Amino acid sequence: MATQGVARKSKLTRNRKTKQPKRSHARELLKTGSLAPQPARTLSIATAIGTQVRTLRRKMDLTGAELAEEAGLSAGMLSKIENGTVSASIDSLEGLARALNVPITTFFASYEEQRDCSYVRGGQGVTIERRGTKAGHQYQLLGHSISGEVVVEPYLITLTEEAQPYTMFQHAGVEFIYMLTGKVLYRHADKAYPLAAGDALFFDAAALHGPEDLIKLPMTYLSIIIYPRG
């Protein structure tokens, strides 16, 4: 009888030990609201774009050198893009899209398919640098929608000390601007609006618009462009 009692006690002890991780999971669920992997483990946008470029290149039976030449890139730059070690500029992506005969949004497909939201770590948005009349205007694409009836493009825009006024932007849809730093007189159609940190502007982007007077540089602002998917 004593032996049976010890055996039952030992079994109960083992059961309590095996149930312990479940209580730990329950505490974690209460703390985070989810047992899903944390964002740090997700695929970066640069890696996702690189994987998509490599997959499309191989489907077309092209070598890296051949695709680089068609896209107007160096073989070294294409290799870095495919390996996800650099954030490709919009100009580079446009060249690759032409060479591969696909819409530019195709490169974001594998990134967006992994979840219903777009996650971009600080400083890892797709960097765009415009030249000519818009020199000094730097853009970071912070996410991209690839499905649905509308396209949403959120940008972090920085105007450096080299920036010049430019009021000839014009495109379909609407745009929302939220100032973070600096000061600017922003032109929309026949009116100009003074903007400083905390100010916002929402407008029809079909009218000519852009920064008319760069009062305090450098400046940064969020720009969210929304337009119907063509």
Image: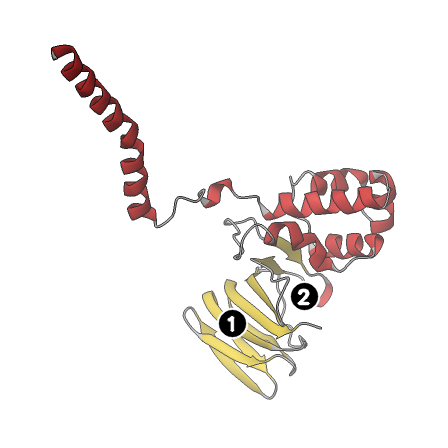
For the residues labelled 2 and 1, the Cα–Cα distance comes to 18 Å
Q: Which of marks 2 and 1 is nearer the N terminus?
A: 2
Q: Which of 193 and 55 is in front in this view?
A: 55
* Residue 199 % position (x, y): 43, 74
Mark 2 element type: helix
Disc 2 marks which amino acid? Lys
Of residues 35 and 214, the one drawn nearer to the viewer in this rendering: 35
| Image quarter hosting the N terminus | top left
- Is the residue marked by circle 1 packed among few (<14), some (14-19), or many (20+) residues within 10 Å? many
Per the image, label 1 sits on a secondary structure element best described as strand
- Which amino acid, by three-letter code, is at mark 1? Ile
Location of residue 84 with respect to 207 vertically, above or below? above
Residue 36 visible to an observer of this rendering: yes
- Give x and y (percent) for residue 16: 23, 28
Q: Residue 126 carries which label?
A: none
Q: Residue furthest front?
A: 1
* Number of numbered discs: 2
Q: Report which residue position mark 2 lands on.
A: 134
Residue 198 lies in quadrant: bottom left
Q: Mark 1 points at which residue?
A: 177
Tell whether 158 sits left or right of 81: left
Query: Which residue in the rendered view is the most extreme toward the top?
Result: 3
Q: Give the residue at x 47% y 70%.
A: 178
